[in-house]
Image (cartoon, rainbow, N blue to C red):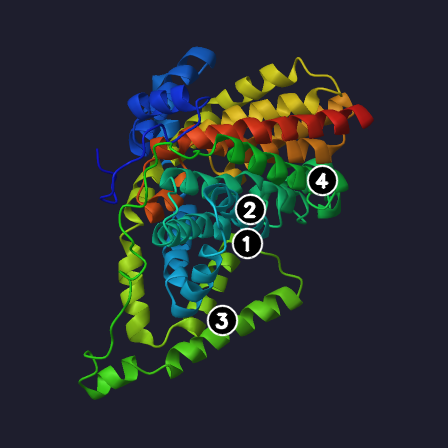
Amino acid sequence: MPSPSGEPKQRASGVSAVMRPVNSVVERYIPSALVFAVVLTLVVGILALLLTDSGFVDVMNGWGDGLSGLLAFMTQMALILMLGHTLANTGPVRKLLGFLGGLPKSPVQAYVFVFVVAAIASLITWGLGLVVGGLLAKEVAAQGREKGIALHFPMLVAAGFSGFVVWHMGYSGSGPLAAATEDSFVTEQLGRTIPVGETTFAWWNITAAIATIILVALALALVAPRAGDNVTELKVDARGTDDVDIEDEVATPADKVDASRILTLITGLALATYLVIHYAQGGTATLDIVNWTFLALIFLLVRNPFELIGLVKNAASNVGEILLQFPLYAGIMGIMTTTGLITVFSDFLVGIANPATFGVLALVSAGLVNFFVPSGGGQFAVQAPIMLDAANRLGVDPSVAIMAVSYGDQWTNMIQPFWALPLLAIAGLKMRDILGYTMVTLIASGIVFAATLLLVGAGA
């Protein structure tokens, strides 16, 4: 049977023998991300009726009122996807991706390389990690095919998404940043801020991030397809499909203005100046600042407005699916918070904890809640107060509670389709295509997260 690239497939499976049963189940029974969101909505609604005092009307009101709860966040996410796609298709960035894509010399090197680069980008800022993971996977796959290296494209994309498993341990982690912010809900509850030196930049968190990258890289290398295995290569080399030809469009004086670099350069410099001032005055990286950074780079790197308009048109086609699903997840969040279902889940696990096991139980709790409230910032806002109160009663340092919730949020992202949507849109794949491999990442990273929290809890 021919592969999507039109070339004969190799003889065996594209995943290791260990993951073959998992991948088979995933391909047969895991629905699209949209169906997943609908099913999750029904499950959460039923659980709220069974486990809380809320009635049908309460659940429906919580769901309906919550639908608009992520509209601002939805716009920010859509911009991250569109601007990231646009930025990656500018000439200078394409050259950089082209250089990086040619570095791996073997299939295993390719999978591990894509993961490590995406992980480093995620530690800098999570949005960059998502975009880089998908686009670098495409570049490595295309160059590998040119060199005659058979690469399993779904695993390359899974490796790119796996880099996202460390995002909440990095500089843009919404939980630690909220705890370090004056007048935040954490400050009001604790009566003080928790500086990032006790969370993000704590020695044990930095060590855990490095250990996670190493262990996940080893795990991906172990399950990578071997010689003779069945691989699904990149269907089409689309690296040149987003090129914008402006030569024949300059026909009028107005066109000459649109074909000039002056206006885009001025705008890019103005945005860059604002960002410098923002950081010089002590500002931090936020979702908006990440977007304006992308936008500044785009304006500085494009040749003219004509090219920018063309690139944005090409990028906008990837935004639709994520816009459709955000209201559904916001509705789930509304049910969880208004009915108190999230408290039921968390209190059950916290009620059986002691100071040594609290961190691991909080990790598991946050991992479960992440299925229903996939927004890292949203989940932290509704779950952190419960965990901080429990930590205080048990005599556990609040930094442990903060990072446990953060670890749980990033951990089960590996089997939750919400955050995979931007990357899958860029790659042209479905969640079931990569889930067999991201489950490997879930297991490997979970070992590090649990071990870290056990050690920190035991030493408290």
Along the viewing direction, whichever of 362 and 103 lies nearer the viewer: 103
Residue furthest bottom as drawn: 253
> Is label 4 in contact with label 3 (beta carbons under 8 Å)?
no
Relative image position of residue 71 (x, y in whole percent): 38, 46
Q: Nearer the viewer, residue 331 or 144?
A: 144
Q: CA distance from mark 1 to mark 2?
A: 23 Å
- Estimate the spatial distance between the alpha carbons at disc 4 and disc 2, rounded to whole Å: 16 Å
**Residue 164 picture location, percent across and down:** 51, 42
User: Of the residues under marks 1 and 2, which one precedes in the sequence?
Assistant: 2
Cα separation, mark 3 vs mark 1, equals: 15 Å
| Residue at numbered disc 2 | 116
User: Residue at (55%, 46%) from the top-left corner?
Assistant: 116
Quarter of the image holding residue 275?
bottom right
Q: Secondary structure at mark 2?
A: helix
Q: Which mark is residue 286?
A: 1
* Disc 4 to disc 3, C-alpha distance: 35 Å
Q: Which residue is mark 3?
A: 271
Whichever of labels 4 and 1 marks the residue nearer the N terminus, that label is 4
Density class for disc 3 (Cα within 10 Å; few <14, some 14-19, many ≥20) is: many
Depth check: give the residue in front, 133 or 102.
102
Q: Residues within 10 Å of mark 1 (few under 14, many from 20)?
A: some
Q: Are marks 4 and 2 in contact (CB under 8 Å)?
A: no
Under mark 4, the amino acid is Thr
Is residue 460 at least partly visible in the picture? no
> SS class of the residue under badge 1?
loop
